[in-house]
Image (cartoon, rainbow, N blue to C red):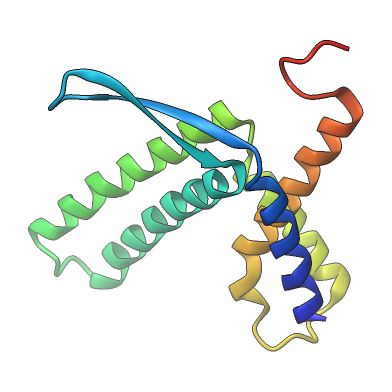
Amino acid sequence: MLFEMSAMITDEIERAEEANIPIQFYNLKNQCYQGIHVSEGDMYVIINAMADYADILMESIELSGGKLGYKEAFYQIHADRCRKISERLQEQTGYNREEAIERCRKKHRYYGDDQEDNSSDVGEEAMYLALKSRQEKTKQGGRKGESG
């Protein structure tokens, strides 16, 4: 069952990789705007990674018991920045990480606890569910920016 889920997730991500999302940023060194393209699936991975990294940093602070010294402030600053980036990208892409995780948890409860380590798949399943939801919305209402 885990293999079948992984295959479905991989298939959905590969389909999402066909549609590129342009990202534009201002290059301070060259003093001009530059653009890159990433897939929708990659963007969701970036969003989740930023949020997960912020959680890891905060967990490190909590587990240290105040023994990190200046690193604690450093970790806090980076965690805040990562959360801000993740939230901004969620707004701009229409992806909602919390909803995706909740859908994943519901699906996890539906399938039961017969898998060895279900907790490690939460992010991947959340991404799969978000992609599936977005594709269903696209099929129902047409693509954004298209008439009809």
Please state the horizontal and vertical placement of residue 22, each as a whole percent of the image.
49, 29
Q: Residue furthest top?
A: 147
Left or right position of 63 against 38 = left
Residue at 78% across / 71% down in the picture?
A: 5
Residue at 45% across / 55% down in the picture?
A: 49
Residue at 36% across / 44% down in the picture?
A: 82
Please state the horizontal and vertical placement of residue 124, each as a whole percent of the image.
63, 63
Query: Looking at the image, how many numbered discs can be counted on the residues?
Result: 0
Quarter of the image where the N terminus is located: bottom right
Quarter of the image holding residue 101? bottom right
Q: Is residue 97 above or below residue 7?
A: above
Please state the horizontal and vertical placement of residue 137, each as a whole percent of the image.
83, 33
Of residues 99 and 18, the one nearer the viewer is: 18
Please state the horizontal and vertical placement of residue 112, each as a whole percent of the image.
84, 78
Q: Is residue 88 above or below residue 62?
A: above
Left or right position of 16 against 30 = right
Of residues 66 and 80, the one nearer the viewer is: 80
Quarter of the image holding residue 61? bottom left
Q: Residue furthest left?
A: 70
Q: Is residue 18 above or below residue 87?
A: below
Quarter of the image where the C terminus is located: top right
Of residues 68 and 51, the one nearer the viewer is: 51
Left or right position of 143 against 92 = right
Of residues 85 and 36, the one nearer the viewer is: 36
Left or right position of 113 against 61 = right
